[in-house]
Image: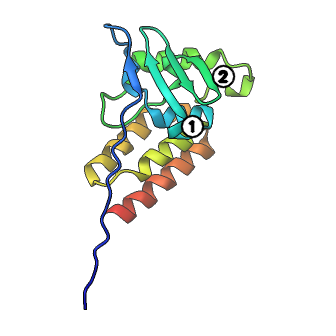
Amino acid sequence: MLLLAKSKEINILESKLTHKSPVLHRLARFVTEEAVCLMFNIQPEDIYVVECWRYIVYVHAKSVSKFVSYADFPPIVGVAPPSKVDIIKWRRRWRRQHEPSARKQAPIWWAKFLQQELWHTFSPPMLNNWDELLNSIEFAFNEATLKQLRTSYESTAKSKI
């Protein structure tokens, strides 16, 4: 009996992030294509380019052409953790929201982004890094959202360990 092994294709995508300034913004380390997709509710293949300028990010995608603040992007694991200066920039950005209820918290899509990124974590040390990140930004979410993120973290930790 002959068994045919299915070939596993690895899809390597070219990054659509480009840095147009020799000076990087301190929050540029958090800019990801996945965050752009959730921010504008688009697919990764719809993104043409994400240009990181000195003080602003330009997103050009199918039906989207917008300038976005660096403070709109959530923190990620794998880069330097958020500092107090980063937290101040996020809070200042959130205060400018039009809805009074959203002025002290991160945008709703941040929780969805963090859950998606958490599910892509494969190693216990990375899970520990996620736990530290969630602890450092717990101020950004209301109790229900924070509980949802904690539950997601615990279920991921149980399934991956």
Mark 1 to mark 2: distance in Å?
20 Å
Q: Pointer 2: what residue?
A: 103
Secondary structure state at the residue bearing disc 1: helix
Q: Which residue is found at the position 60% from the left and 29% from the top?
A: 105
Q: Position of residue 59 (x, y in %)?
A: 53, 22
Residue 83 in sight here = no
Secondary structure state at the residue bearing disc 2: loop
Vertical position of residue 81 compared to residue 127: above or below:
above
Which amino acid, mark 1? Leu
Given residues 157 and 46, the one toward you in this image is: 46
Quarter holding the C terminus is bottom left
In the image, taking residue 1 as reference, residue 131 lies left or right, namely right
Q: Position of residue 14 (x, y in %)?
A: 36, 35
Point out the residue furthest to the bottom here.
1
Given residues 114 and 158, the one toward you in this image is: 114
How many other residues sit within 10 Å of disc 2, few (<14), some (14-19) or many (≥20)? Answer: some
Q: Which residue is found at the position 36% from the left and 40% from the top?
A: 132
Q: Pointer 1: what residue?
A: 38
Q: Earlier in the sequence, mark 1 or mark 2?
A: 1
Q: Position of residue 93 (x, y in %)?
A: 57, 16
